[in-house]
Image (cartoon, rainbow, N blue to C red):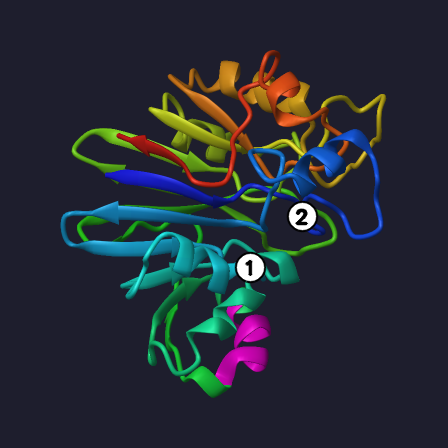
C-alpha cells in the first residue's frame, strides 16, 4: 500500500492567520513549513481511501490528482478532521463513510446533503475496504467522548494512525497496534514546556509511544507552528510534511 500525508497541520494550519513567527514566515514562502489540515490518502491495488477530510480537501484533491475515493474513515468530529468532505459536492456522490455511530451522527448532520453511504463501525472490530483490514482503536482526546485511531493491515504489514490523542492510550489499544511498520503520530508541539496541550501528544510523548509499541518507522503529523521551521525541526524530529509518501 502507499500512504500519502495530504495535510500535516494542526487546526489552524501553518502559516497561522495573523502570525509572523519564524515558522509562519517560512510557511508563507511555501515549502515544507506550509501545512494544510489533516487528511491521509491510502492507496491499494483495489482502490483509494481517505483517513479524515480536513478543511483543505479541495486543494489536496487537486494537487494529488485524486478523482475518486472508495471510502472515508473519520477519527472524530472536530472540524479540522471532517469539514472538507463537503468538497465532494458535484464531484462524487454517495461516498462510503466509516466511523463510530456517535461520530457519524454528529458529522452527517452537517454533511447529509451529500447523501454519503453510512457504515457504522464498532471499536476494536475489524472490517475490510479495498482489500485492506481496518480496525478502529480507542484513544483519549478530551473532551471528545469517542475518538479513535486507525490500524490498517495488508499482507502482514501494519500502518497505525493515532488520530488526535493524548499520551494515555488504553492497554488493549497498545497491544493491538504493537510493532507497526509505520506509526503516524499526533505531535502538536515540540515540548510541553513550550506549550502544554493536554488533549494532544507532544514530540516526546510521540517518540515514547513509538518506542513502546516498537514502531519500525514513525512520522509526526498534526504539527503546529510552535515547532521551528521544518528544515530545522526535521534535524531533531521525524517531521512529516504535506505530500510525504510511504510505500509499505
Give how far across and how far down residue 91 sits, in percent: 36, 77
Give how far across and how far down residue 117 sits, in percent: 35, 77
Residue 99 appears left or right of 205: left
Q: Is residue 105 magenta?
A: yes
User: What residue did someone put label 2 on?
Assistant: 13
Q: Residue at x 50, y 40 (%)?
A: 242
Q: Residue at x 51, y 16 (%)?
A: 212
User: What residue did someone put label 1 on?
Assistant: 56
Dividing the picture into quadrants, the one containing residue 24 is top right
Residue 4 visible in the snapshot: yes
Q: Helix or strand or loop: what does disc 1 sit on?
A: loop
State the CA–CA distance, disc 2 to disc 1.
10 Å
* Dominant SS in magenta: helix
On the rendered image, what quadrant is the C terminus found in?
top left
Residue 128 appears left or right of 224: left
**Viewer-proximal residue among 239 and 26:** 26
Give how far across and how far down residue 84 sits, in percent: 53, 66
Residue 34 appears left or right of 74: right
Q: Residue at x 62, y 26 (%)?
A: 230
In the depicted structure, whether residue 102 falls above or below residue 216? below
**Viewer-proximal residue among 144 and 31:** 31
Q: Which residues are magenta?
A: 104-112
Q: Residues within 10 Å of mark 1 (few under 14, many from 20)?
A: many
Q: Residue at x 32, y 47 (%)?
A: 42
Give how far across and how far down residue 10 sits, in percent: 66, 45
Amino acid at each position: 500500500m502507499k500512504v500519502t500525508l495530504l495535510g500535516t497541520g494542526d487546526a489552524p494550519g501553518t502559516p497561522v492567520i495573523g502570525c509572523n513567527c519564524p515558522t509562519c514566515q517560512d510557511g508563507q514562502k511555501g515549502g515544507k513549513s506550509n501545512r494544510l489540515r489533516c487528511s491521509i490518502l491510502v492507496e491499494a491495488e483495489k482502490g483509494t481511501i481517505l483517513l479524515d477530510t480536513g478543511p483543505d480537501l479541495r486543494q489536496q484533491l487537486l494537487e494529488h490528482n485524486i478523482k475518486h475515493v472508495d471510502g472515508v474513515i473519520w477519527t472524530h468530529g472536530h472540524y479540522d478532521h471532517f469539514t472538507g468532505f463537503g468538497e465532494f459536492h458535484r464531484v462524487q456522490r454517495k461516498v462510503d463513510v466509516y466511523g463510530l455511530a456517535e461520530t457519524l451522527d454528529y458529522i452527517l448532520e452537517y454533511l447529509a446533503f451529500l447523501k454519503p453511504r453510512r457504515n457504522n463501525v464498532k471499536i476494536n472490530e475489524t472490517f475490510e475496504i479495498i482489500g485492506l483490514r481496518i480496525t478502529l482503536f480507542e484513544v483519549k482526546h478530551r473532551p471528545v467522548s469517542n475518538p479513535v485511531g486507525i490500524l490498517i493491515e495488508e499482507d502482514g504489514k501494519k500502518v497505525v494512525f493515532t488520530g488526535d490523542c493524548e499520551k494515555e492510550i488504553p492497554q488493549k489499544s497498545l497491544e493491538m497496534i504493537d510493532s507497526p511498520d509505520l506509526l503516524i503520530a499526533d505531535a502538536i508541539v515540540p515540548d510541553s514546556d513550550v506549550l502544554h496541550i493536554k488533549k494532544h501528544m507532544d514530540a516526546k510523548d510521540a517518540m515514547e509511544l513509538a518506542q513502546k509499541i516498537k514502531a519500525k518507522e514513525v512520522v509526526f503529523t498534526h504539527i503546529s507552528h510552535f515547532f521551528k521551521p521544518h528544515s530545522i525541526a526535521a534535524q531533531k524530529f521525524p517531521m512529516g510534511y504535506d505530500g510525504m509518501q510511504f510505500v509499505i
